[in-house]
Image (cartoon, rainbow, N blue to C red):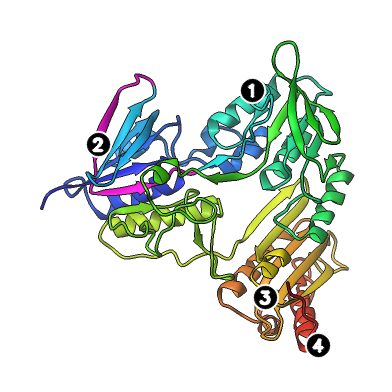
């Protein structure tokens, strides 16, 4: 039997998980594996960059799960600083360019894995590429930002553009570094991944931490000084001085190669695959990680959700299938957690706006509770909001904002969503209880009881 060739484009979570799993299933005599990575690192945690920037963890080595050399020792030919610039699906080959030498050559494949990740949103504004303006996507980005922060003096100002997950995490990092921080957000509240009423809780907490939160405001330019470096962020509400500017505007799927090759893309621009992570309509082309759209188990539609947890699972599925086994990735419910200083933020499932967009009638329940029994030392407040389908009572989504012990409670809701449980069924869940860990009625179950009562009362909302 001829040796088959697996080519992987992208050397981070999805790509290298796929390569590693395929190698474990098939040896070098059966499968040659070549991975192309245009950066300087493989298999690293981009999610850890804000904590590196804030001085909470070391970097970059601590954020690397496996180096290129370690992959090579396991029989994977990793080509660093090499960018794939073209796909020829008919002839089953990729065009790769060495970024150091400029040399280009074609490489044939029997199986192709696209794990090209996502690119940060960087609007075409005056000064957006000036020195002092930082993205937070790769370890190279993190290294540049940390170098800028290490060279700073006390009393400096920072502006974070965007108040999503990266934005609030970078606000915390900059506070820890001693910066006066302003966060500028175009929406009415920070964390557009929450409903506005829950986002308001985040805003109030950030303001109490000394972070200036400016909402309903559009950034129009980055002003530069005589040396060409950023000195302020201009908005439709005025200018905000800045020694450092951090972009936290989210990401989009990096699918330029896929689009040029005519591969199928979804509404957000992510690659469309089947449950085996095979690109639709292409038997030997696979895709995973931040460049794909995945099935949302709550809405039944595909969504782009850029998380390392998904990317690693995609890679495991792809590697199993390329290696001759069978595996699937069934979908997601949209679970995510974050924090800013001691405030924990979590969500899973649909927001109200998303439920309305799907034409669903729903009820909501919002409760205030504590992380432990109220009489036990260290009990901290939390707010839990729950959405349930009107009529059926099916759980649609949960959001949690609170202090220590709040965020990971969302995992209970994530399991319930995956199991398509009703809020009434949730009230009978046998959750662990002891005063140091929870009130007698866990806050998630209190919200479920209230949502179940609202369903029975017929208090529904819709688009």
Q: Look at mark 2 in the image and give the residue it sits on.
A: 107
Q: Look at mark 1 in the image and give the residue it sits on.
A: 147
Give the numbered dot on residue 360: 3
- Which one is in front, 89 or 229? 89
Q: Look at mark 4 in the image and give the residue it sits on.
A: 457
Q: Residues within 10 Å of mark 2 (few under 14, many from 20)?
A: some
Give SS at disc 1: helix
CA distance for labels 1 and 3 = 49 Å
Name the image quarter holding residue 284.
bottom left
x, y percentage for residue 252?
Answer: 56, 45
Going from N to C along the chain, the mark reached first, 4 or 2, is 2
x, y percentage for residue 376?
Answer: 84, 66
**Residue 150 vertical position relative to residue 292 in the rendered view, above or below:** above
Residues in magenta?
A: 100-117
Give the numbered dot on residue 293: none
CA distance for labels 1 and 2 = 37 Å
**Residue 64 vertical position relative to residue 421 in the rendered view, above or below:** above
């Amino acid at each position: 039997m001829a040796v088959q060739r697996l080519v992987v484009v992208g050397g981070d979570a999805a790509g290298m998980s796929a390569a590693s799993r395929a190698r474990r299933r098939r040896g070098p005599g059966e499968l040659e594996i070549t991975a192309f990575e245009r950066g300087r690192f493989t298999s690293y945690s981009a999610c850890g960059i804000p904590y590196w920037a804030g001085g909470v963890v070391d970097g970059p080595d601590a954020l690397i799960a496996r180096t290129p050399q370690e992959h090579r020792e396991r029989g994977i030919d990793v080509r660093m600083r090499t960018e794939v610039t073209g796909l020829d699906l008919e002839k089953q080959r990729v065009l790769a360019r060495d970024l150091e030498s400029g040399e280009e050559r074609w490489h044939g494949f029997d199986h192709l894995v696209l794990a090209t990740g996502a690119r940060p949103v960087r609007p075409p504004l005056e000064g957006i590429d000036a020195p002092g303006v930082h993205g937070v996507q790769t370890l190279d980005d993190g290294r540049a930002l940390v170098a800028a922060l290490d060279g700073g003096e006390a009393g400096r100002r920072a502006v974070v553009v965007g108040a999503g997950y990266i934005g609030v995490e970078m606000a915390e990092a900059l506070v820890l570094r001693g910066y006066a921080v302003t966060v500028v957000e175009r929406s009415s509240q920070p964390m557009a991944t929450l409903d506005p009423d829950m986002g308001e809780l985040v805003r109030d907490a950030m303001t109490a931490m000394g972070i200036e939160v400016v909402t309903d405001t559009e950034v129009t330019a980055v002003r530069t000084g005589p040396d060409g470096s950023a000195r302020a962020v201009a908005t439709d509400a005025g200018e905000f001085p800045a020694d450092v500017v951090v972009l936290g505007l989210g990401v989009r799927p990096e699918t330029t190669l896929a689009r040029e090759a005519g591969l199928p893309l979804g509404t957000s621009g992510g690659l469309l695959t089947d449950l085996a992570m095979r690109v639709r309509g292409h038997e030997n082309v696979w895709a995973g990680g931040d460049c794909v759209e995945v099935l949302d188990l709550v809405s039944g539609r595909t969504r782009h959700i850029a998380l390392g947890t998904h990317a690693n699972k995609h890679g495991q599925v792809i590697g199993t299938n390329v290696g001759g086994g069978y595996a699937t990735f069934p979908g997601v419910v949209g679970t995510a957690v974050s924090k800013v200083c001691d405030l924990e933020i979590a969500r899973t499932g649909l927001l109200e706006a998303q439920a309305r967009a799907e034409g669903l009638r729903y009820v909501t329940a919002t409760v205030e509770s504590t992380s432990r029994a109220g009489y036990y030392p260290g009990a901290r407040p939390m707010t839990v909001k729950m959405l349930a389908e009107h009529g059926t009572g099916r759980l649609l989504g949960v959001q949690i904002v609170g202090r220590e012990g709040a965020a990971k409670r969302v995992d209970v809701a994530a399991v319930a969503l995956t199991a398509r449980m009703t809020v009434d069924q949730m009230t009978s869940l046998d959750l662990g209880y002891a005063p140091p860990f929870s009130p007698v009625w866990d806050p998630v179950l209190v919200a479920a009881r209230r949502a179940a009562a609202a369903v029975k009362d017929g208090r529904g909302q819709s688009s």
